[in-house]
Amino acid sequence: MKLKVIDVNLSTGGPAIAIISEADAKKLGLRASDRIRITRLRTGKVAIAVADISSEHIRPGEIGLFEEMLKILDIKEGIHVEVIPSERPRSIQYISAKLEGNPLSRKQIYEIVSDIVENHLSEVEMTYFVAACYSNGLSMEETANLTNAIVETGTRLEINKRMILDKHCVGGVPNNRTTLIVVPILASLGYTMPKTSSRSITSPAGTADTMEVMAPVSLTLEKIKEVLEKTNACMVWGGGNMNLAAADDKLIRIRHPLSIDPEGMLLASIMAKKKAVGATHCLIDIPYGFMAKFPTKQSASSLAKKFVKLGRMLGMKVKVVMTDGSQPVGNGIGPALEAYDVLSVLKGGGPNDLREKAIYMASEMLAMVGGKKAREKVIDALDSGKAYSKFREIAIAQGGKKHIKLPKARNFFDVISPKDGAVFQINNKAISRIARIAGAPQDKAAGIYLRVHCNDRIRKGSVLFTIHAQSRAKLENAILVAKECESITVK
């Protein structure tokens, strides 16, 4: 059937979708989510799309194409294409099998992941895959196969180094911005560390968001190799132009609104990004405690063992540290405020809890690769200024300015203690929520600056934290939430 192309001026951000009228769908024997094969008549270019059926906006004889399809076919509105039904991907059968509790083979997992990357699966079908992995779980063999499939279907960073270091924190703790301190410490000691990090999904800032207030983080692979050649390290965003572990980024977009995180997918997601940059040694930080992702040491320990086992299966040395996640690490929460803490530590100051955790993490990594007197070397790199010099070198190589100037908020509000006493607990989730309502991470200067930590003794009227916001309206909303929830408990 020949149909005229209509540009719907929309992008799916993923699956290839085409809209046809109800009348034409009946003639072709199609139902919603069936596949159609679209051929551009003059050039013969072919694309497979998920069919969406419209009763109003697309008339008989027309086909509405999203931006992704227009790009694939290199076509404009008004040009005619040939449309015929096409078979659904076989990977849908494998997803159905997993929903029924059957294990998936290496080949089946690779085909599912490949179809995700090629945009052959609809969001509904990808959601069923996530749900199947959540309800029926993934064996360690399936997890290893999923990890390898994600790596093999994405871009890889090829570096000719015998030893490549990497680290990751599973998250759930505000600030905790050790990466931006650990990387320059180890790079200043001669180790290679191509650190790719995420932007925020639900937190007030991801590592990439914080680094971005000091230097560009959206770099091409070629630029990253250039930075590594000059400085031994980089601190960049793992998405965008890099396309590392592309399937994982698509799966994360599905998992996030569902608020489910299948353990096998969590493991594969983290380790695929490590393998994609060629990591030989990797340190994993699992914070646990009140309002952290993992409430108990036991739950953190179970995941830790799986990280180590998966590392062995992938040919990677993995060490896991379980750390205190019961309160924020550092004072600043939000991109610029976290950057302020990072620079303070690199210059030899505090916050002391962030400094100590960064020293601990860097020492553990140095010990992993056989470094003697690891803690002494790490502290010397910080106190001598070597780590700060290396940080500036990396930031400038990534395109940052010689003199770092952090953005500052226009509006502030101090939240004070209602009574004398000691800080009993800090609610990580409430603190993060207030910081996000204040504008973080979109407003780089927005967020919270903590004035207290657990066990601090305080007086009535003492400042617990200061809310920073660019707009007055966002500040007022953040103040309302801060008054409604007990983010810091004083007893």
Image (cartoon, rainbow, N blue to C red):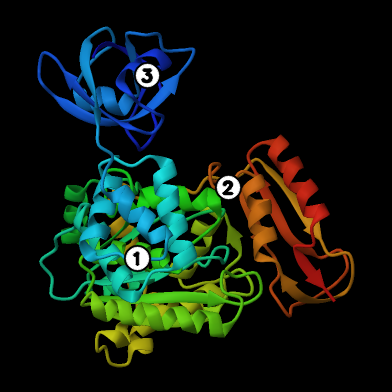
**Disc on the earlier residue, 2 or 3:** 3
**On screen, 21 above or below 329?**
above
Residue drawn at the location 34% of the way across and 73% of the way down: 185
Which label sits on residue 440?
A: 2
Q: How far across and down, in percent of the image, does residue 252 sit?
A: 43, 52
- What residue does disc 3 label? 26
- Measure the C-alpha gap from mark 1 to mark 2: 28 Å
Q: Which of 29/358 is in front?
A: 29
Q: Which of 107/363 is in front?
A: 107
**On screen, 179 above or below 305?**
above
Q: How far across and down, in percent of the image, does residue 15 sit?
A: 35, 36
- Identified by mark 2, the residue type is Ala
- Image depth: mark 1 or mark 2 in front: 1
Viewed as shown, does residue 283 lie left or right of 328? left
Say what secondary structure mark 3 lies in: helix
Residue drawn at the location 30% of the way across and 29% of the way down: 68
Q: How far across and down, in percent of the image, does residue 404 sit?
A: 42, 51
User: Within 10 angstroms of label 1, few (less than 14), some, or many (20 or more) residues?
Assistant: many
Residue drawn at the location 28% of the way across and 52% of the way down: 112
**Disc on the earlier residue, 1 or 3:** 3
User: Can see residue 336?
Assistant: yes
- What residue does disc 1 label? 268
- Image depth: mark 1 or mark 3 in front: 3
- Identified by mark 1, the residue type is Ala
Say what secondary structure mark 1 lies in: helix
Does the CB distance between marks 1 and 2 fall below 8 Å?
no
- Identified by mark 3, the residue type is Lys
- Measure the C-alpha gap from mark 1 to mark 3: 42 Å
Does the CB distance between marks 1 and 3 fall below 8 Å?
no
